[in-house]
Image: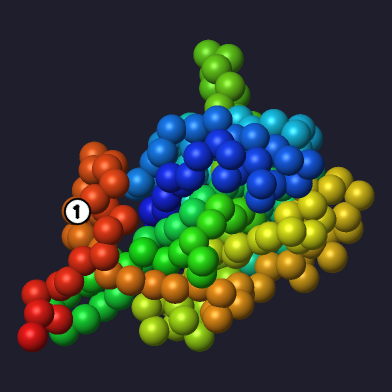
Amino acid sequence: MCGRYTFTRTTDAGAVVYPEGISINANPRYNIAPTQYAPVIPMDDPLHTYYFRWGLIPHWAKDVSIGIKMINARAETLGEKPAFREPLRRSRCLVPADGFYEWKKTASGKQPYRITLQPESVFSFAGISDEWVSPEGNRIFSFSIITTEPNELMADIHDRMPVILSGEAEKKWLDPRTDVSEVITLLKPYNPFRMKAYPVSPQVGNVRADHAGLIQPYAPPALLF
């Protein structure tokens, strides 16, 4: 799964990586967590970024609480789940990031790792979104990050990983003319030789923590010898 991620790059970095030179205006975030709002690039307006809530709330949901259970969507069952099937067709999105966290089970407990591209740069998670309207008429736009089986790098840390898109894959994902059968083929593990992982502070587990120290390499006590 993907339960925390980062987006610390400047606007200029975002403009280089995204289709059509999209510029992303966002403050650095070192620990984006579920239910928080984060920038996304939606399928119906791919030249701009918007802030959506992380944790998909289907348009038919009774309340927002379902969103915490839908921070991720499995690539293998996207076309089967009622909450994901329609968003896959009509409201795909890109989720800008420059790293994500995952917890590895060790003899001394769970150790968080930060995973980035190599060299480090901005990239996109494949996402889907939906619009929910409350009984009071309030509109909430939300998103889910799609996950897939792990590549060789991630398999040592966790049994899932988020789908990372770049270049032409980003454009195809956002293009409404791309057939669903074709976008499904984009949902595969990223090249492990273009990624790196390193241990970070356990402070990442605190949703209130959001500072640059979280992305610094950390030497767990068990490794200090």
Q: How many marks?
A: 1
For residue 89, say whether it is visible: no
Badge 1, how many Cα within 10 Å: few under 14, some, many 20+? some
Above or below, 222 against 210 in this view is: below
What's the residue type where badge 1 is placed?
A: Gln
Q: Dividing the image into 4 quarters, which one contains the C terminus?
A: bottom left
Residue 149 is left or right of residue 181, and the answer is left
Identify residue for label 1: 203
Residue 170 appearing in the image: yes
Q: Is residue 20 above or below residue 121?
A: above
> Mark 1 falls on what kind of element?
helix
Residue 35, percent across and down?
41, 39
Residue furthest to the top in view is 136
Residue positioned 39% across, 72% down in the render: 197
Residue at point 30%, 75% (across, down): 104
Relative to 60, is 158 on the left or the right?
left
Measured from the top left, where is residue 156 in percent x and y? 39, 84
Which quarter shows the N terminus?
bottom left
Rendering quarter of residue 179: bottom right
Q: Residue furthest right?
A: 177
Q: Nearer the viewer, residue 24 or 165?
A: 24
User: Where residue 206 appears, x then y in whole percent?
Assistant: 22, 48
Instruction: Measuring from the top left, give residue 90's x and y in whole percent.
Output: 79, 44
103 displayed left or right of 85: left
What colour scheme does the image use? rainbow
- Kindly identify the residue that appears in the image at 55 percent across and 17 percent down: 138
Residue at 37%, 78% in the rendered image: 157
**Viewer-nearest residue: 180 or 194:** 194
